[in-house]
Image: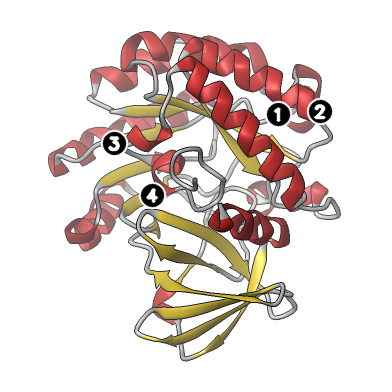
Amino acid sequence: MEWVRLKARMLEAGSVRLSGEPADEYISRSAAGPSAGAPGSLFFSPGGSRRVRVGIDEKSPIEVVHRGSGAADLLIDGKSASGRLEPAALHCPRQAYITVSGTCIFHCRYCPVPTLPGRRKGIDEIVRMVEGVADRIDCISITSGVASSIEEEEAYVLDVVSALCRFDLPIGVSIYPLPGTPARLHALGVAEVKFNVEAATPELFRKMCPGLSWDGIWESLSSSVALFGRGRVYSNVIVGLGETDGDLARVMEGLAALGVIPVLRPLTPAASLAGMPHPSAERLLALFEVHGEILRRAGLDPRRALTMCAACTGCDLVSGRDA
């Protein structure tokens, strides 16, 4: 349980102060989501399959001291823990997690991507990226903004997936879905999908993600379970948008009842929510217990995840992996 408390505290802080030996090879940068455009992040692991991803900020109250060759000490709240810095293959350890379009026509309030000078990666470029890390990955994960339209983005991602099938690795895809998106991805051999409800209530969703459809996402999640199977479909739910813990419990129960694994994602304050606080460690720990119980009752196990966030676990507390 000690690791769970340490990880919750690091997620609350959202960053660490990095010192010691040079660690450039262990620093990764995001092209999508709330961390896009940030100075960088690192993965700290105490061993085994447990890890945490945090940003790098010289003002952070938490310090990671790199001793060299990946060995590192975590100094937090007067305590010390030994571990290692994990190199990211592409975005995270053991995965080629690639953002296809680092730009978006939508303006979700927590996401800075629409304001950044992002671009769309070419299919040949993406294939070369995967070739460059093929000897140190277990899966391929694809996400994307919406460069011009939802329809055009899906068509392009389908072409990307077709080009990546040659690697014979599990592929996970997280894009904004249309009716029929799950079936089209399944037909290409995609192993897992993640369609994000993002907020705990439809009212918050409409406020945070103007122009997107709460009902459409739920419909895609439901149809995905029939295709990919229970426990092979995921959905991010952000903690810290103004919802109550009861709201979160209800949305997690609704997702789990469908056979979807909810991924509780602590808010990374960015874009128009830059002034919001990170969720407290105490809240994250309490929700971790509720999350675990909901998953157990539904017979869902994140430890079976093949791709994407549930396989990485760096940004979230994950039942079965962190405790």
- Horizontal arrangement in the rendering, residue 64 relative to residue 115 (left or right): left
232 vs 26: above or below: above
Residue at the (49%, 45%) spot, across then down: 323
Give the amino acid type for the residue marked by disc 1 in the picture: Ala
Task: Give the residue pinned by disc 1.
Answer: 199
- Horizontal arrangement in the rendering, residue 317 relative to residue 321 (left or right): right
Task: Give the residue pinned by disc 3.
Answer: 171
The answer to whether the residue labelled 2 contacts the one labelled 4, judged by CB atoms less than 8 Å apart, is no
- State how far apart marks 2 and 4 are (Cα): 29 Å
Q: Which mark is residue 64?
A: none
Task: Give the residue pinned by disc 2.
Answer: 207
- x, y percentage for residue 99? 44, 47
**Disc with the residue nearer the chain's start (4 vs 3):** 4
**Disc with the residue nearer the chain's start (3 vs 1):** 3
Regarding mark 1 in the picture, which secondary structure is present there?
A: loop
Regarding mark 4 in the picture, which secondary structure is present there?
A: strand
- State how far apart marks 1 and 2 are (Cα): 9 Å
- x, y percentage for residue 127? 24, 50
- For disc 4, the neighbor class at 10 Å (few under 14, some 14 to 19, many from 20) is many
**Disc with the residue nearer the chain's start (1 vs 2):** 1
Give the amino acid type for the residue marked by disc 4 in the picture: Tyr
- State how far apart marks 2 and 3 are (Cα): 32 Å
Task: Give the residue pinned by disc 4.
Answer: 97
- For disc 2, the neighbor class at 10 Å (few under 14, some 14 to 19, many from 20) is few
- For disc 1, the neighbor class at 10 Å (few under 14, some 14 to 19, many from 20) is many
The answer to whether the residue labelled 1 contacts the one labelled 2, judged by CB atoms less than 8 Å apart, is yes
- For disc 3, the neighbor class at 10 Å (few under 14, some 14 to 19, many from 20) is many
70 vs 117: above or below: below
Give the amino acid type for the residue marked by disc 3 in the picture: Ile
The colour scheme applied to this rendered structure is secondary structure
**Disc with the residue nearer the chain's start (1 vs 4):** 4
- x, y percentage for residue 61? 74, 75
